[in-house]
Image: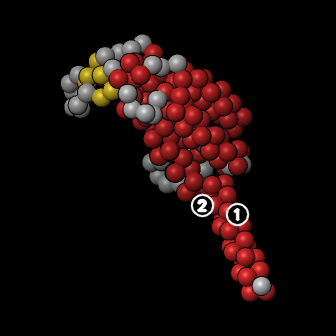
Amino acid sequence: MHGYNAKDMARSFRTVRNNTIKIAEEIPAEKYGFKPGEGSRTVAQTLAHVAVSPRFSRKAHGERITEARMDYFMATMQELAQKEATLQTKDQIVHELRTHGDEFANWLETLSDEVLAEQVHFVPPIQQDPKTRFEMLLGVKEHEMHHRAQLMVIERMLGIVPHLTREQQERMAAMQAAQQQHSAGSAGA
């Protein structure tokens, strides 16, 4: 179908989720109530939203819906909001990120190319062209990356250098050290 299949999607989702978990672990519990601005979510609310949101896609595509209807969307979103509200502590949120992230990735791996190729049509008032399940499921990872970017800015606001930035800085320092060592060795030859 694509060359990029369900197993690839699951692997990629796991990478994204592991990076989200790392951020969730690095932000101190006492900062989970931090809100970067009026009208935005707190750290805890953002992480709870990220932890719970793949359940929508798992439900919709697990049930193999072929029409996205507003009533289905609203009812499912209400269920998810109730689940998000139960996640109050850092430990609860990190547990949810781990457990249900793994469950979602494991479920993704079970999807065939035929299932991923199925089309979902959007019923008015939703004004959208049909999408394949594949495209819609890629959106789960994109959604999480969107919120993870917000969390990385929040980390900076809290004085935390995000782990991905630290890792990149370490790689650059190692490359510079190797280059200097190489240059010093060449000069002595």
Task: For label 2, count other residues whose C-alpha is less than 10 Å away and answer few (under 14), some (14-19) or many (20+).
Answer: few
Q: CA distance from mark 1 to mark 2?
A: 22 Å
| Quadrant placement of the N terminus | top left
Q: Earlier in the sequence, mark 1 or mark 2?
A: 2
Can you give x and y, in whole percent of width and height, for residue 39 in the image? 45, 48
Q: Quadrant of residue 61?
A: top left
Residue that carries the numbered disc 1 in the rendered image: 170
Q: Quadrant of residue 132?
A: top left
Q: Secondary structure at mark 1?
A: helix
Q: Amino acid at mark 1?
A: Glu
Can you give x and y, in whole percent of width and height, for residue 21 in the image? 65, 40
Can you give x and y, in whole percent of width and height, for residue 15 in the image? 59, 40
Q: How was this image coloured?
A: secondary structure
Q: Residue at x 60, y 30 (%)?
A: 101
Q: Amino acid at mark 2?
A: Met
Q: Residue at x 62, y 44 (%)?
A: 19
| Quadrant placement of the C terminus | bottom right
Q: Considering only vertical position in the picture, is 162 above or below 49?
A: below
